[in-house]
Amino acid sequence: MEILSRIISHTPTWIFALFAFVLFMGARRMRTSVQSTGRVWLIPGVFIIWGLYGLVTRPGPLGPVLMDWAVGAVVGLGLASFATIRVEVDREHGLVRQPGSWVPLVRNLFLFGAHYILNVLAAVHPDLHDVAIALDIGVSGFSVGYFAGWSWGFIQSYRRAPDVALAAT
């Protein structure tokens, strides 16, 4: 019980709100939905900003931090190249239909969980601090790389998608 109270005491309250948002948005993508093109960019935007924030706020010598981040970004970009993005588009109304998938939920929870676990580990186990922080900066780079690659794939799919009449759900 002591370890749980230590973990909770090291967790800022905004983390719980972010977790709820990430969980909600991932669960929502499990079913086919029609949404505005702007809403499509919410989760990628959150993880790209979080990944860049992790890079610019990480203490320590820039060289090793940048190297860990860049390795993560390249791995994320490579993985995103395998993502299949299918959309139908109503360009007149700015709407997109995406088929339901469990992948966004798992991806979102993995990225959030990796950040959370590594930061808690660094906070409650000083002997593992440096390793956990190096891995976390890699996760930050992975997030940016993955969502940059996903965004490129989405834009290409959007351009090729058939123009259909959609209604927002």
Image (tube, rainbow, N blue to C red):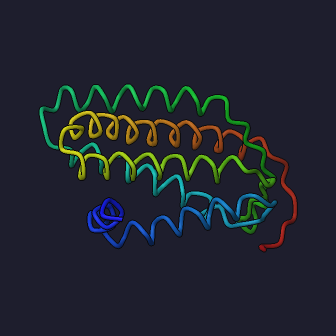
Q: Quadrant of residue 24?
A: bottom right
Residue 147 screen position, x and y as percent? 52, 43
Looking at the image, residue 49 sits to the left or right of residue 96; the answer is left
Residue 82 vertical placement versus 117 (above, below): above
Residue 112 screen position, x and y as percent? 47, 52
Question: What is the count of numbered marks?
Answer: 0
Quadrant of image for the C terminus: bottom right
* Residue at the (30%, 51%) spot, across then down: 53
Q: Quadrant of residue 94?
A: bottom right
* Residue at the (68%, 62%) spot, across then down: 27
Quadrant of image for the N terminus: bottom left
Residue 8 screen position, x and y as percent? 33, 67
Q: Residue furthest front?
A: 1
* Residue at the (62%, 59%) spot, across then down: 40
* Residue at the (25%, 46%) spot, across then down: 122
Q: Nearer the viewer, residue 89 or 77?
A: 77
Looking at the image, residue 93 sits to the left or right of residue 114; the answer is right
Q: Nearer the viewer, residue 109 or 78?
A: 109
Q: Nearer the viewer, residue 122 or 154?
A: 122
Residue 67 vertical placement versus 26 (above, below): above
